[in-house]
Image (spheres, rainbow, N blue to C red):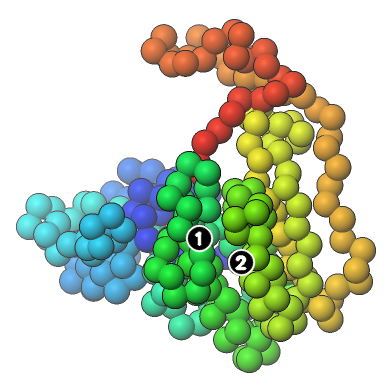
Amino acid sequence: MSTSEIDSSAVLTNAVIHYGLTQKMVEDFRDYPDTDIMVRELTEKNIGFNPKTGKAYDWARHKRRGILHIRRVWLAVHLTRNLGDISRIEKLPCADLWTVSFPCQDISNAGKRGGFEKDSGTKNSLVWEQIRLLKKAVSDGEAPAVLMFENVKGLVQKNFIKDFQMLCGRLSELGYNTYYKVLNAKDFGVPQNRERVFAYCIRKDADNGTYTFPEPTGIRTSLDDILDPKHVSKTSTYSKGAAKAASTGVRGHGR
């Protein structure tokens, strides 16, 4: 499995959750390359780029402060097989499944609603980088069997449905049938009222036309079912009343 992520905190979190990265692992690892090589790799992959300022992260400065942070992030990048900035990737490794969870800020009701038109420069327009890489995979005979897209439900609502349909049309040209539906986490045993659109794009030569989305499980879970009150901070917004709201879930914002 490979990933594409430039937020260093997200890279570290991914490594901790999925690969068990610990401080001890960072300290005990013995195969680090030369510090200059690590700095160059993190810089070339644009790890730590700040989209708000448009500035790359200065990894070289850590050489003067100590190399522990460089090693920590470099090891996380390698554990997660992180390819870095998607706009700098020329080709993705051959795989049967690609997952595409591109930024939501420009289509979310809580965001600036800038949309995701190609070459628009919005965060959401990064999805077209994925299409560029898919076109390359198709031309190389390495097209994945399935792509899975996930984003806020605004993607298929009035303001952006035409853009989404254009995206589906491009996927069709590349050989994929697209199936999509808005699903809510609360309908599948998660105590959160979180609606997201999921789109499964199946390669036409592998699609028998029978794909259907799962039906709600009927399982209702509340926060009381999963939280131990002994470990809930007194300053948190958790309350018995909110936790009992199993039928509506707990509303989540953003991604």
Q: Quadrant of the N terminus?
A: bottom right
Image check: 239 left or right of 235?
A: right
Image check: 44 left or right of 186?
A: left
Which residue has dot 1 on it? 115
In the displayed structure, would residue 10 be above or below residue 189? below
User: Which disc number belongs to residue 223?
Assistant: none
Task: Please indicate, yes or no, whether residue 236 appears anywhere in the rendered image.
Answer: yes
- Give how far across and how far down residue 251 sits, in percent: 59, 29
Q: Residues within 10 Å of mark 2 (few under 14, many from 20)?
A: some
> SS of the residue at dot 2?
helix
Task: Please indicate, yes or no, whether residue 15 appears anywhere in the rendered image.
Answer: no
In the displayed structure, would residue 219 be above or below residue 140? above
Q: How many marks?
A: 2
In the displayed structure, would residue 140 be above or below residue 68? below
In the displayed structure, would residue 227 be above or below residue 106? above
Amino acid type assigned to the residue bearing label 2 in the image:
Asp
User: Which disc number belongs to residue 163?
Assistant: 2
- Give how far across and how far down residue 160 sits, in percent: 60, 59
Which residue is depicted at the point 28% across and 55% down? 52
Q: Residues within 10 Å of mark 1 (few under 14, many from 20)?
A: many
Image check: 223 left or right of 16?
A: right
Which residue is depicted at the point 83% across and 52% down? 213
- Give how far across and how far down residue 91 sits, in percent: 51, 82
Which residue is depicted at the point 66% across and 41% down? 195
Residue situated furthest front in the rendering: 158
Residue situated in front as seen by the camera: 164 or 29: 164
Marks 2 and 1: in contact by CB < 8 Å?
yes
> SS of the residue at dot 1?
loop
